[in-house]
Amino acid sequence: GAVVSQHPSWVICKSGTSVKIECRSLDFQATTMFWYRQFPKQSLMLMATSNEGSKATYEQGVEKDKFLINHASLTLSTLTVTSAHPEDSSFYICSAEYMGQNEKLFFGSGTQLSVL
Amino acid sequence: SQQGEEDPQALSIQEGENATMNCSYKTSINNLQWYRQNSGRGLVHLILIRSNEREKHSGRLRVTLDTSKKSSSLLITASRAADTASYFCATDAGFTGTASKLTFGTGTRLQVTL
């Protein structure tokens, strides 16, 4: 089956620093990947849709300059949280569409970000 | 606001019992999907039911869909401790054949005790 790898699993950083999270499709090409944010015991909130070779589409209320998304290849999308603040602490999850099984998503294992 | 509202928010049962969780949504959909999330992990796809289907089975899972009531239910039969997780419904109102912008429900946290 399709495997999506997300790295790192957890990261602790100081306020004001930037953090990059990687999402890789290991055995398939993903033209579209999605980034979500999840607070404890809550649902997933879609942040942005990442399209290979083009700019990401951000959901309303998500600051594109704060959450930089790059989808430079068919197997890699990155989310960079710039100038992180404690309120950015959250669980971030990526997912990818798998051609041939377009209607369902394959998820990375998530990244727990803690900003001190 | 969430497209999908699930109830109950939390459910605690004993191993061997059945677990039923419900999902309601607001807009027309192409399909509805159920995902499972273990604590601190990503989501795993369980089952997909299309808008023209009423019931679907996969192993110990049974999903129903009532488009007139805009609701779905997930039944896990003969539950096991390993079924302990959060379960999310997700609706797809986009173009058929793509997973564009799945909208996730609020989730049900299932606890199965020995």
Image (tube, coloured by chain):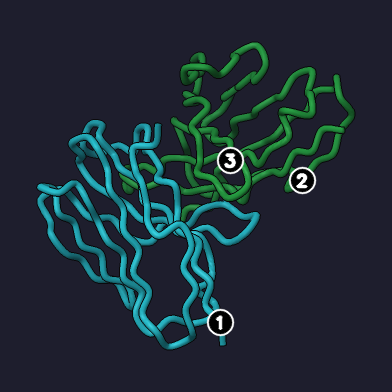
Chain colours: A green, B cyan
Q: Residue at x 44, y 31 (%)?
A: A32
- The answer to whether dots 1 and 3 both sit on one chain is no
**Residue A20 screen position, x and y as percent:** 74, 29
The residue at which mark 1 appears reads as B113
Location of residue B81 by image quarter: bottom right
Q: Nearer the viewer, residue B9 or B105?
A: B9
Q: Chain of mark 1?
A: B
Q: Which residue is mark 2?
A: A10
Protein chain holding label 2: A
The quadrant in which the N terminus of chain A is found is bottom left
Give the residue displayed 44% in from the left and 47% down from the top: B106
Residue B5: x %, y % from top left: 36, 46
In this view of the protein, which residue sits in the foreground, B28 or A102?
B28
The vertical placement of A8 against B8, above or below, is: above
Q: Secondary structure at mark 2?
A: strand
Which of marks 2 and 3 precedes in the sequence?
Answer: 2
Q: Residues within 10 Å of mark 1 (few under 14, many from 20)?
A: some
- At label 2, the amino acid type is Trp
Of labels 1 and 3, the one closer to you: 1
**Amino acid type indicated by mark 1:** Thr
For the residues marked 1 and 3, what is the alpha-carbon distance in whole angstroms?
Answer: 26 Å
Q: How dense is the environment of label 2, judged by Cα within 10 Å: few (below 14), some, or many (20 and up)? A: some
Q: CA distance from mark 3 to mark 2?
A: 14 Å
Residue depicted at x 78% and y 23%: A84
In the foreground, B46 or A37: A37
Q: Secondary structure at mark 3?
A: strand
Q: Which residue position holds label 3?
A: A38
Q: Is residue A97 above or below residue A83?
A: below
- Residue type indicated by callout 3: Gln
Quadrant for the C terminus of chain A, please. top right
